[in-house]
Amino acid sequence: MPVVERLTFPDEAARHAAFPVTRHGIFMGHAGVCPLPKVAEEAVQLGAHKGAIASQEYEGFPQELDQARAVAAKLLVSAQPEEISLLGPTALGLNLVASGLTWNAGDEVVYYPGDYPSNVYPWTDLARQGVKPVPVAPARTGHLTPELVFASLTPRTRLVALASCHFLTGYRLDYKTIGTELKKRGILFCLDAIQSLGATEVDAAYVDFLSADSHKWLLGPLGAGIFYVKKEHFAKLRPALLGSWNVTSPRFIAQEEIAFPDHGRRYECGALFGLGILGMKASMEMLLQLGIDRIEDRLLGLHDYGAALFRKAGYEVLSDAFPASSGRFEAKTGILTVRKPGASEADYVALFNKLKAKKITASHRWDLDGNPHLRFSPHFYNTETDFDLVLEALSS
């Protein structure tokens, strides 16, 4: 198993061994669905082998799940293992929050209509229960500032549900400032963290609920994920899905009284995606060993390098409209999204096809007004040369 101990590799052979996708092209689509690193691939294969020669709940499997909770808690800085449920996709965790809280008519939930749909529908659907969804409306796509969020609050606000990073623009949410103020006001805070975990530090101390699948920056399998509930809210957030796994059922016999365990399993109603969790665990361990702060610095460096190339080529770089970096807050992330002034939809399709022809994976995305963009989301193992080749392909 190739061990990744540093952000750069001594040669291409080492990079290819650790990230097999690099043998087949340039992958800059981690804000979409990532390729698996070798450590995750091998962890899944080992788990499958163990499950082929014995039960899939082989000896040691429960302990591996507990280890995955512990690793996930470490990734969330201030979380405890008993606050972690091993659930994906992201939408599942968000829906567990929407469905598990007891709502009163007139309660308000603040959300952003321009977020990824998974972080919109659970909140707008609450209108059926008499809850008022309150939209935040930034002047620019994804530019959610604490001031905008605070201006949307009223005495009836029960929950604020936002994404840690906008999926199109890459604008980072100042969740620490927002979370600190919401706690003072007694308002719950739910964070969709799928565009941040594995790329930037996310500290659970500032949120009440958090959900993130592993298939983006965490470099894990589709369907494996993390759902975090601060333990003080266990009684407040009733499990919305019930089964033999999360309802106390001694000797596998259903009980008249429904009781839940006092840890993260209370939100896991049935058998978990074991192989996916093993792959996610291996990738999380690799990322923690490298250091999330170092990974973030690397991604910001790649962002700046790529942005300079796109500016020189005449593209509009969306992050140029972000507020200037400060010691307290950095709005940029690893997502680099660009527009070509005057280009039509057909032009963007042609540009995207140029990338595909050179085996370069990026994303073609649109904003709320229907304007097309090209989105690039490299991870730490990508190189400056990758961006050079991107621009070369687009200009061909």
Image (cartoon, grey):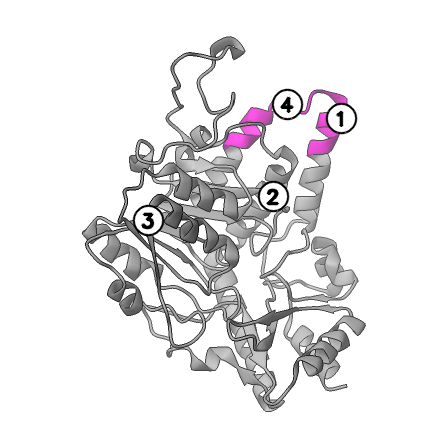
Residue type, label 1: Ala
Q: Earlier in the sequence, mark 2 or mark 3?
A: 3
Give the structural element (helix, strand or loop) at label 4.
Answer: loop
Nearer the observer, disc 1 or disc 3? 3
Residue 41: which quarter of the image? Answer: top right
Q: Earlier in the sequence, mark 4 or mark 3?
A: 4
Give the structural element (helix, strand or loop) at label 2.
Answer: loop
Residue type, label 4: Glu
Residue type, label 2: Gly
Residue at the spot of label 1: 52
Measuring from the top left, give residue 307's x and y in whole percent. Answer: 55, 80
Residue type, label 3: Val
Residue at the (65%, 66%) spot, across then down: 28
Residues at circles 4 and 1 in contact by the CB criterion of under 8 Å:
no
Q: Main secondary structure of the magenta part?
A: helix
Give the structural element (helix, strand or loop) at label 3.
Answer: loop
Residue 279: which quarter of the image? Answer: top right
Residue at the spot of label 3: 131
Residue at the spot of label 2: 223
Residue at the (53%, 37%) spot, across then down: 68
Residue at the spot of label 4: 57
Residue 110: which quarter of the image? Answer: bottom left
Nearer the observer, disc 1 or disc 2? 2
Measuring from the top left, give residue 297's x and y in whole percent. Answer: 48, 67
Q: Residues within 10 Å of mark 2 (few under 14, many from 20)?
A: many
Q: Nearer the viewer, residue 180 or 292?
A: 180
Q: Earlier in the sequence, mark 1 or mark 3?
A: 1
